[in-house]
Amino acid sequence: MITKVFYCEDRPEAILTAIYDAWADSTPNREIRINLRSEAVQVSFVEIQIPVESSYEKAEKVLLSVSKRLGFRVHRLIEGALCAAENDKADAIFRFLQYAFSAGHDVSGEYGTPVVMRLFELDRKARRESHLMLGFTRFSILPGNIAFAKIGPVNDVLPLLADHFAERFNTQPFLIYDEKRHRSVVYTPGEKWYFLEGELDLSSQLPALADEYERLWKRYFDSVAIRERFNPVCQRTLCPLHFREYMIEFK
Amino acid sequence: MDVRMSLSIEEKLEILSDAAKYDVSCSSSGSDRAAVKGAIGSSQACGICHSFTSDGRCISLLKILLTNECVYDCKYCVNRRSRDTVRTAFTPEEVCELTMGFYQRNYIEGLFLSSGVVKSPDHTMELLYEVLFLLRKKYRFMGYIHVKGIPGADSVLLEKAGFLADRMSLNLELPTEAGLHLLAPSKKEENILGPMRHIQGGIHGNAAASKGVYRVTREKIGQTQDVNYLWETALTKEELGLQVYDGVQIPRGSDRNQVAAVSGSSFMSGVPSRIQATDRYTPSSLWLPESIHREDRNWLASGKLSGFVPAGQSTQMIIGATNETDFDIMSKAENLYQNFDLKRVYYSAFINTTHDSALPETPDGPPLLREHRLYQTDFLMRYYGFQAREILTPEAPDLPLLYDPKCTWALRHLEQFPVEVTRADYGTLLRVPGIGPTSAKRIVLARRTGMLTFDALKRMGVVLKRAHYFILCGGQQLYRTRINESFISSELIALDREKNWQLLRSTNVRQMDLFADFQLYQPNTNIISA
Ligand code: SF4
């Protein structure tokens, strides 16, 4: 039997497009898989490889039918899993959706079912990091009162952060740049946030002098530690080193 | 007292944060407020940690004193009148600028404002109110505010501040009146419990206020007899001092999950998925104390904030400065949860900063392991439905330091085990060592639709190396083990040996992994530690 393999980029909308295409293609008796383009391509004569071209429209359609037919819990699971750092996520989501749509209802509580469990794990991984990033993301204020943050998360958490910061900043424009994936979220008050693609170098925009509040924050950070409770191991567990690269109080 | 106002903001920040840091409560949870047009800030129901200090504690709020000047002389306190130290004070504007500057850069979730007592409790409460008012109204700050209630301050002043804050706390400091008398002679228990009761009444009148875990757990496991709904008992509103809230009853609104359900595909299009909850009440100006100025009443009544102390009250007790037992402490905490509806009780291992002759010296450092066991017990009461008396008794009034309190309880009640996970109800599952509220809920959900296996239990978050002694899954044990106290306890101790050894070895090492290794106590992160 010949397997069809859809290849897509590691972007949420690309994976959803691949799922859309794979779904449309579902001919009986044919094995279908979705792989991320970053994975080693193993050419095999029993595989047909189909590259996927991202389409926001198709991606939107998939999400819409998920929330309509399967409920918001499943929708949330998919959102999280799409952002996970794991290589099998595209295929895992596809298999999960095959199962969920055939069940036709909210299957998010079926922890005993392997395809559900896998999705739940992917979601948990991504959200664990995105929850930490809600606190660990550091902004500096650029001329023109734009808050700017640079991040480099393990999981693709940027889409999971956008709503939170749009609500939190509300009256203040901001830009969060993921320097690993070359993608930003841009928000201006009163409008929806959007993704900005491409590499960004704002170092020339940053004020030359250290911001007064950065100095104050460092001072505060040092003064609130209690000497008698000194415990760097616990600190490292709760705030792992790779986050600290982006946090001014550790510089 | 010479109060130096001319210090730089940096020096003030250092002095007034250093003086505030021994107050442990720092969570920013419990208040869920959506963005407001034209104002910066929102508030998330689950706490967010912004950083972790070198002692492993979470920074969520800018925790400062308005001033470290104080007319009282509590023996354990770094700010006591008789202590020779530099005194200073922030201006209200300075507090606001700092809060806004830090908030804008995402260093903090909000402000935790406390103060030494200037002139009198009333005067101090007025000062705190002024700062809060400026921050909310002029700076249009909608983030989280935790304000200290000053014991002995007039209840109207507490109320005023309560309409601007998310959380309010009065520290009990010591679990018994005798302890207070010994170390803080100017404080009376009734001056702390009285205002707590008053605030409780106000919170009860606020439909936007969230319920405490203690109560939610009991509703889930059907043990509401543990909770006293005081306003439903014989006590009159007058007795509760509630004239202000008379006659106003707003029913709780629709399920927030239902609201979230319509938010559909926010993900790609950037529509905020957190639609403003429809059950947020608008406080009518009726609810506000007369003493609030007319214009301010109108602003407060415009419904931008979430009413009176929406994130509830908390308190703190110092552990190890006086000789109360763990039983005394946890009975007090239970009383506060049951009768005062507190959101959190915090326990703070005593750190001797003043070396007063009435205080014990602590050459081995603060009693951190004891503090940790108390937090575990607190979690057992709030999240697991235990009563203090099940864990501690007057005959055995102190927690063993070597095992955690849940294992201790289980070993004493082996007749209730093994538990069959495919059938046991939620409340019973909660009592199994190695199963927490999240994994118990997953078990209940999962078995509706499918078979449970040990592998699935593990992936759901059950700590099998602990739980397997106590459970059956489909009639089977994971390994063939005896259900016998001495056998299991020696196994469990072996499991924990290295950790306990580290915990006890020396002050520094003792603190290792205290928070990280025990899922029971992770301040502010219990949302994510599934
Ligand atoms: S009243 Fe508060 S600040 Fe003043 S000495 Fe007592 S504990 Fe310290």
Image (cartoon, coloured by chain):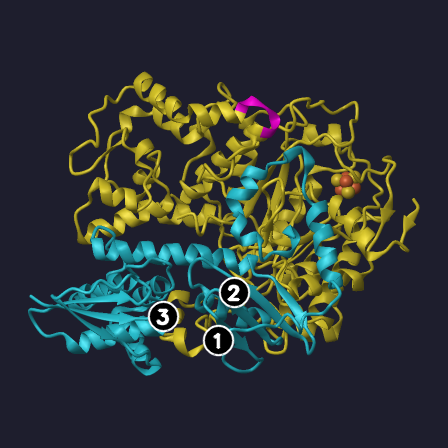
Q: Residue furthest top?
A: B486
Residue B78 placement (x, y as % from top left): 78, 37
In the picture, the disc for residue A198 is: 1
Query: Looking at the magenta stretch, what is its main secondary structure?
Result: helix
Query: What residue would you read off at disc 3?
Result: A12
- Disc 3 vs disc 1: which is toward the camera? 1
Q: Are circles 1 and 2 on residues that touch, CB within 8 Å? A: no
The answer for which chain carries disc 2 is B
Count neighbours of disc 3 (C-alpha within 10 A) and say few if under 14, some if 14 to 19, many if 20 or more: many
Chain A drawing hue = cyan
Residue toward you, B249 or B17: B17
Q: Is residue A229 within the magenta segment? A: no
Magenta-colored span = B504-508
Residue toward you, B443 or B290: B443
* Kind of residue at disc 2: Gln
Residue toward you, B277 or A160: A160
Residue found at x 57% / y 52%: A244
Count neighbours of disc 1 (C-alpha within 10 A) and say few if under 14, some if 14 to 19, many if 20 or more: few
Task: Work out whether disc 3 and disc 1 sit on a shared chain.
Answer: yes
Residue B262 placement (x, y as % from top left): 36, 74
